[in-house]
Structure formats: structure tokens, C-alpha cells
Amino acid sequence: MSGGSWNHNLIMGNLMRDVGMQIERTNCKSFSLSHHVQASSTRYFYPDLGIVCETPLFGEQEALLNPVVLLEVLSPSTERYDRVNKFEWYREIESLQEYFLVYQDMALVEAFRRSREGSWVGSTFTAYLGLEAEVVIESVGVRIPLRKIYAGVELPSIVITPET
């Protein structure tokens, strides 16, 4: 999404920093909307944030084929598309283990995870709600408190200040 809101940009910056720091000594790398993923032979998407582990594989137009994690920061104009349509296509990516939806207007992150058998049928859903909650990206061993994700973001009735 080009031209995201100020909160969208703050959330993305916070996520990129914290995810990047936690995976820097692993075989995983994070990428942002500057790189696209291929969900089918005709579907390409620019996720807000993704994580790839092992060797990145590329398809047509240098589209990444093997992300392990994808995150979307929701906005009113894209929420339904990200939640329903895009997620339907993302589920076609064999390597994808987790999909996260990050709200801009409240401290809430939703996680969808493949089942242990590798299917989206029987997948799990977890909602991380409130600034004291901690998001867990299980497939890459990352833990981020929502307070850090929303640092500097103005939510209705509160402003989250960065930790010192």
C-alpha cells in the first residue's frame, strides 16, 4: 500500500526494527513492501512485512516464492481485502506458516497459523490485545510486546511513548 498513514508508517518501522533485531543472527531475513511475493501463477502481492528463511526462491518478475511469515497493517480501505481476499491467496503459498493482521486504531494483532500437519484447515487463531500483550511469531522464534509495536502511535484516547 503506497501512501500509508502516519500510524501505518510508525507501526511498520517498529516492526521492521524489532523483527530485524531478533532474526539478525538466524538464517531468516525480513523484507517490506518494496518486494513482492507470488501467491499463484497470476497473483502477486506486496505484503507490509514478510520473513523468509533459508535461501530465498524467486519466480517470475523476481517475486519471492517462499516466505514463512507475512504481516499486513490494516487500514479502513484495505482491511476486508487483507483479511479475506489476500489471505485466501496467501494460503496457496506452500512455505507460509503464519499470517498476521496488525490494527492501526487499537492495540490488537491477530495471528493465523497453519496446523502442525501443514494445512490451513484446522489452523489456529490467536488475538493479542492490549499494550501488555506480547506477539509471538512462532515459526521464527520472535516475541514483540505490543507496547513496542505501537510505540509513538496515537491510538484513540492514548499515546504510547517509546520505552527508555
Image (tube, rainbow, N blue to C red):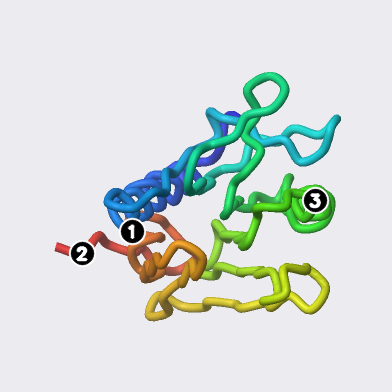
Mark 1 or 2 closer to N-term? Answer: 1
Q: Nearer the viewer, residue 32 or 55?
A: 55
What secondary structure is marked by label 2?
Answer: loop
Do tag 1 and tag 2 residues touch (Cβ < 8 Å)? yes
Q: Nearer the viewer, residue 73 or 54?
A: 54
Mark 2 Cα-neighbour bin, 10 Å: few <14, some 14–19, many ≥20: few
Instruction: Return the x and y of residue 22 as percentages of the image width and height.
Output: 31, 57
Query: Is residue 69 depicted above or below 54 in this figure?
Result: below
Q: At label 2, which amino acid type do we have?
A: Glu
Q: Residue at x 46, y 71 (%)?
A: 135
What secondary structure is marked by label 1?
Answer: loop
Q: Which mark is residue 119?
A: none
Q: Residue furthest left?
A: 164
Q: At label 3, which amino acid type do we have?
A: Glu
Gap between marks 3 and 1, in whole Å?
33 Å
State the residue position of label 2.
Answer: 163
Gap between marks 2 and 3, in whole Å?
39 Å
Q: Residue at x 54, y 70 (%)?
A: 108
Q: Which mark is residue 151?
A: 1
Gap between marks 1 and 2, in whole Å?
8 Å
